[in-house]
Image (spheres, helix red, strand yellow):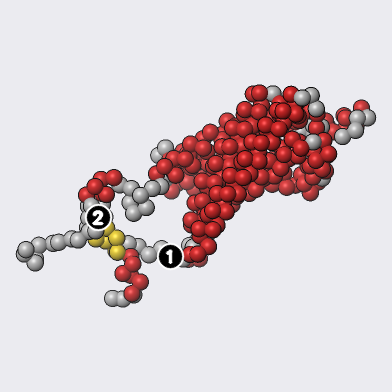
Amino acid sequence: MQDIRKALYVGSRSDGTLIQRPMSPHLQVYRYRLSMVLSISNRITGVIATAGAALGVCWLGAAAKGPKAYATARKVTGNPLGQLVLVGWLASVVYHTVGGIRHLIWDAGYRYDKEELNKDGPVAVGVTAGVSTVLAVALLAVAGCRRSKRAKAGKVS
Amino acid sequence: MNASVPHIEVMRSQLGRARGLGAGHSGTSHWWAERVSAASLLPLSTWFVVQMFRLGGADHAEVVKWGGKPVNATMLAALIITTFYHAQVGLQVIVDDYVHGKAHLPTRLLVKIGTSLMGLLGVFAVIKLVVRSGSGK
């Protein structure tokens, strides 16, 4: 022997026989694969989706507080920069949903072979891009139309 | 005992092996909680996206009227509770994976408290909207 750390890598099989567990190689030694990006993206988008949900609750809280607070919230949602954040939230939620559905499929025991995984990855990217774009454009268009209609009618806020 | 007979010492009871919960004694329920809340969020968030098409660019009175309707308030509260529950369960896994040592417990508590408070804030906002809509303001 050997490396003293190997003592920590002794495990037991379910039948009780002792076994030397494999040491995990460092992340850098792996060749780039789409699946690794999609995997970590599911976590990252989950965190972003949570942050966005917190913003959504703030919007709801502003509406509950009163017209003045809601007007402040609308300054954010009407601002191009604010809308960029909203689109980012939307795209994150869409990807996290697609990734989540894939996870549920895997949990049910399907599409978990190497070939299937590599085939489904680009599909997940395509679906996310398509759905996010369509939803973002449609939502911004609907909101913009309603706003300009109200502005024409001369109503304030 | 004959020394040549293979002999294995495993510090694990037969009951422990039968239960199959491993050294952590938990994890299965956490896994299920993540999956069930995820599946519940599919219809709830779809509903929310549809509602956003109705509400995009709406003024304050319209939002209050919308949030005051019983079905909307119910769906909204369910969405908020499920979202932050799922966030809590999911973020806990991330904290368990990446935060080690002394920082682990405080970070985990912070996640728990933060997601719980945001969920509560959302639920009370819904209640306030219902009250506001009832009083005609």
Q: Which residue is mark 2?
A: B12
Does residue A24 appear anywhere in the picture?
Answer: yes
SS state under label 1:
loop
Does residue A94 appear anywhere in the picture?
Answer: no
Q: Which residue is mark 1?
A: A25
| Foreground tag (1 vs 2) | 2
On residue A67, the disc is none
B87 to A64, vertically: above or below: below
Task: Give the residue displayed 80% in from the left and 38% down from the top.
Answer: A70
Task: Give the residue displayed 63% in from the left and 44% down from the top.
Answer: B118
Which quadrant holds residue A61?
Answer: top right
Task: Report the front residue among A93 and B118.
Answer: B118
Image spot of residue B109 (x, y percent): 54, 53
Q: Are marks 1 and 2 on the same chain?
A: no
The quarter of the picture where the N terminus of chain A appears is: bottom left
In the image, taking residue B137 as reference, residue B112 lies left or right, namely left
Which quadrant holds residue B130?
Answer: top right
Amino acid marked by disc 1: Pro
Chain bearing mark 1: A
Tell me, yes or no, whether the two marked residues, 1 and 2, touch with CB atoms within 8 Å: no
Local packing at callout 2 (Cα closer than 10 Å; few below 14, some 14-19, many 20+) is few
Image spot of residue A110 (x, y percent): 42, 39
Amino acid marked by disc 2: Arg
Task: Give the residue displayed 64% in from the left and 36% down from the top.
Answer: B123
Task: Report the front residue among B26 and A104.
Answer: B26
